Amino acid sequence: MSLYNVKESTGKGRGVFLNTDITEKTEVVHSKLIGGCLNYVEWKFYCEYCFKELKENSKISCGCGFNYCSMECQKKAYDEYHKNECSIIKSLREIPDGIGEILLLYRCSIKTVKWEDYCSLPNINNYKAVEYCVLLFKSNSSLLKTIWEVIQANSFCLTNGEEQVIGIGLFDYASFINHSCCPNCVPLQNKREMSIKSLTSIKSGEEIFISYIDITESFERREKELRKWHFSCGCSLCEEDKKRYRYHLLCECGGSLFVDEIGQFAKCKTCKKVFEEGDDKYEDALYQINEYRNLENDIDKLSTNKQYEQVIEKLNENVSVITSLIDEKDVREHYKFNSIMFHSFIQLKKYNEAAQVGKKLMKMVDTIFPLLYITGVVEHFHLAKVFRMSGDENLFQEEIEKVRLGISILDDSHCLVKEFNEYVIAIK
């Protein structure tokens, strides 16, 4: 008997509903990869077939730029799809933007799949990538268009053991599951398979949800990201966030200001006073918001050590801006900036400084992430390593136990489980 069935979900199209009560860590859905592709920048770091992280001295390279962890993976890729695409990739003068989606379109196109079994999809207006795919797949344009729509609306991010995005993939069955920013299940990718497991006990008849996006982001960023799937989330977290202004700016009366940049005015929630363009209060509010956004943009572009140094300096300089703009109850925004400082110090090997920030980060991680949520488990693992490096054995033990509990949702073959076990053995 199947644990679930697919049926209409009010306002969401189809959804997945349980046929029986389940406990936490139960595998509800097991999905296999229909087609997947690494992002271009990751081609030299991960196996193109199984997505395993590569070791420099053992990888097998192909002339088109792809790399493999073994002859077996290279042969499987060649037999399944790569024999037709390899020469075309080699012939390209430059790799086009969106190459991952283009190759994914091709790889899904050559599969024998019952596409009509997938969710009904909105129209997608931009099919530019299909033009590139014609070189790879000479078939009728209507099939390509249909598959492109499926990919746009139903694809998942491929991730490594640290939950960092390395590519894009389409999995069978998992695409039926709807989104919530407060999910009761989590997708766990392991090579070319995906397991959907429960984060908590769920009753028969209830719908299961996963998150399509980063649940640590602000309400505004989550809303913007979800527009790609042409819907807004109405979960309890989003409904609560709608009641809270993102920017904690104060009127003279002590009330919170709502800043409308389109209408160019700010209005006090308490006394209803309106400040228009030209008023000092409105211009000051706008200036602070722009400074805050500049910080966000800088954070999104981090790569070199120099940039990490600069962002730490900038964050320290703008602590007053951040604390004055973000409501103290908005844990996600505070988490974001503390997490960036924490990982910046790690990148620069400043472990004592990282530990100081980590102490503030601990409670935020516990608040935001369910215990078994893999992104939270990864963050606890980073915290544990930093506390050990800084000599705080008590906090190290506290965090390592959270990791031990967290990885219990994963299969033994998962790369994070292997890394954790190797780490524990190494420190004994």
Image (spheres, helix red, strand yellow):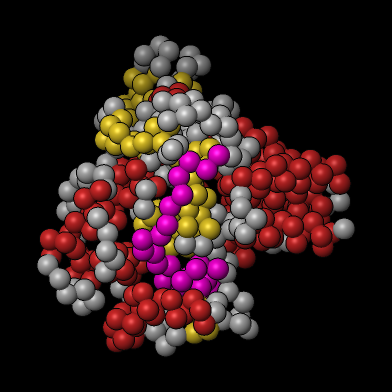
Quarter of the picture holding the C terminus? bottom right
In depth, the one of 16 and 279 nearer the eye is: 16
Q: Which residues are magenta?
A: 26-52
Task: Give the quarter of the image for residue 163.
Answer: bottom right
Asked if residue 80 lies in the magenta stretch, the reply is no
Above/below status of 131 relative to 416: below
Q: Which residue does the image show at 52% across and 71% down from the upper left?
A: 46
- Residue at the far front: name it: 1
Asked if residue 37 lies in the magenta stretch, the reply is yes
Instruction: Please state the horizontal and vertical placement of residue 390, each as a whole percent of the image.
Output: 82, 52
Q: Which residue does the image show at 51% across and 62% down from the upper left?
A: 191
Q: Which residue does the image show at 86% across and 51% down from the upper left?
A: 391
Q: Which residue does the image show at 39% across and 84% down from the upper left?
A: 64
- Residue at the far top: name it: 271
Instruction: Please state the horizontal and vertical placement of residue 318, each as a whole percent of the image.
Output: 58, 43
Instruction: Please state the horizontal and vertical placement of residue 139, each as a whole percent of the image.
Output: 15, 71
